[in-house]
Amino acid sequence: MRVHLNGQAFQYGTRKSIIVDLWDSDTQRPTTTKSAISRYKSKYPNIDLDLQNIKIHLENIERIFSKIYTEHSIGSNMIDTKVFRTRLDKELGYNKTKSKKDTKLSFESYLDLFIKEITIGDRLIQSGTANGRRYKEGTIKAYENLNFRLKAFKKHINKSTFNYKDFNIDWYNAYTQYAVSKDYHPNSIGNTIKNLKAILNRAKDENHHREEGYKVRAFKKITTKSNKIYLTNDELELLYKLDLSQVEHLDRIRDIFLCGCYTGLRYSDYSRISKEHIKEHDTYKVIDIITLKTNERVIIPMKPELVAILSKYSNSLPKSHEQKINQNIKTIAAKAGINMAIEQQLITKGMTTIKQVSKHKLITTHTARRTAATLMYLADIPTIDIMKITGHKTEKQLLDYIKVSKVETAKRLSINPYFTGNKLVKA
């Protein structure tokens, strides 16, 4: 809220955040446009209630401001802004405090409350470029999974509850041993540890405990390099030309997936492409969209195949669920003949084995983004330009993300002057 008091600008934070697309700058309230709201319904099922709560909250601020302003204005020409802010905080319930004893929560109570608050939007991100924004659905699921894994482990060791002091190197060793016996993937184990440490650090910062046992060097996230794949230009052509006209839902899923392959966007962004994201510049069209994860604007030239796909749906992609796409894109790829055997490193019970897996079984929604980045790189598009689309901050991050086989590397190097050699030399 911005107003003028005593001729000076006075700002007061609402302590709320909203998706930019859902804000009506004319009314200074959440939008009531059903088409705009429906685009976020699948990701945020309670979006209607959230928007209504924000509207009520803003109206409360406005009402209380008017009330205090009227009271202060009677018989006085000057308003003390500090007193004004204090009154607003009090009327809105912002300055309610409890004793330190009352605010200390047990680990499990804190974790439950943390998950509840990030789910309903009462707790926002407090650092980085996303500071002040709501937690993403994927992050919320990660903390819910942490809670699930801890409960399962607690049951396994026949323990009634976990306290802050329990999380030391002995606990770490016991949990990782248990997780390996359950055949959890090393990266899954690592993510559990990472999220647990994040919760413990946050609880410590908020004065709920003073334990340090989890801060030893060995209490760390473990990772293993994943064997991720991408699709070649030939495989994309197979998908594009596959006749799915008799299976409408597979036809839609194939088209949504290909939009990711042609743009390099994350699923959360390419799945919501609509006509307002399509712009014309001179003789070419682009996708002009603000990404949800980083809130950055990207402008991507549209390939002819992308133009053709979007025209099927009046330039607004049909909606689907990521889980459905992950389930069905494998079937679609198999129908298209994408069955090349891929050597995969598998970890079972802590033991590493090598196995041949049909490529179609490895395809997910994220394969689309990796495919786009890799094919742009193979097409000799400068990495700085690819980064503007993918959002990678450094070239090293991008090159780690891109998947180029050794055969393709050899093919690219074969035309390098170093390997073409002296053409005067006869073979």
Image (cartoon, grey):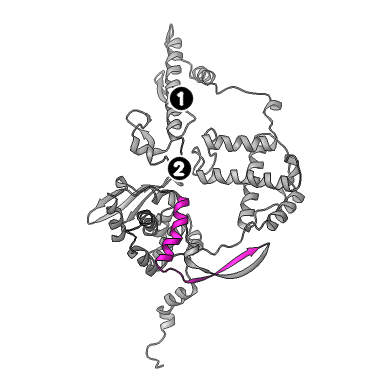
x and y percentages locating residue 96 in the rendered image: 59, 22
Q: Residue at x 46, y 69 (%)?
A: 339
SS at badge 1: helix
In the image, residue 211 above or below residue 344? above
Q: How many labels sit on residues?
A: 2
Q: Quadrant of the N terminus?
A: top left
Q: Which stretch is magenta?
A: 322-348
Q: Which residue is mark 2?
A: 43
**Gap in angstroms between the C-alphas marked 2 and 1:** 23 Å
| Contact flag, marks 2 and 1 (Cβ < 8 Å) | no
Q: Quadrant of the C terminus?
A: bottom left
Amino acid type, callout 1: His
The residue lying toward the viewer, choosing from 303 and 94, is 303
Residue lying at the far front in this picture: please name it: 246
Residue 181 appears in which quarter of the rendering? Answer: bottom right
Residue lying at the far top in this picture: please name it: 75
Amino acid type, callout 2: Lys
x and y percentages locating residue 65 in the rendered image: 44, 18
SS at badge 2: loop
Judge depth for marks 2 and 1 and give the one in front.
2
Q: Is residue 263 magenta?
A: no
Q: Which residue is mark 1?
A: 57
x and y percentages locating residue 390 in the rendered image: 43, 55
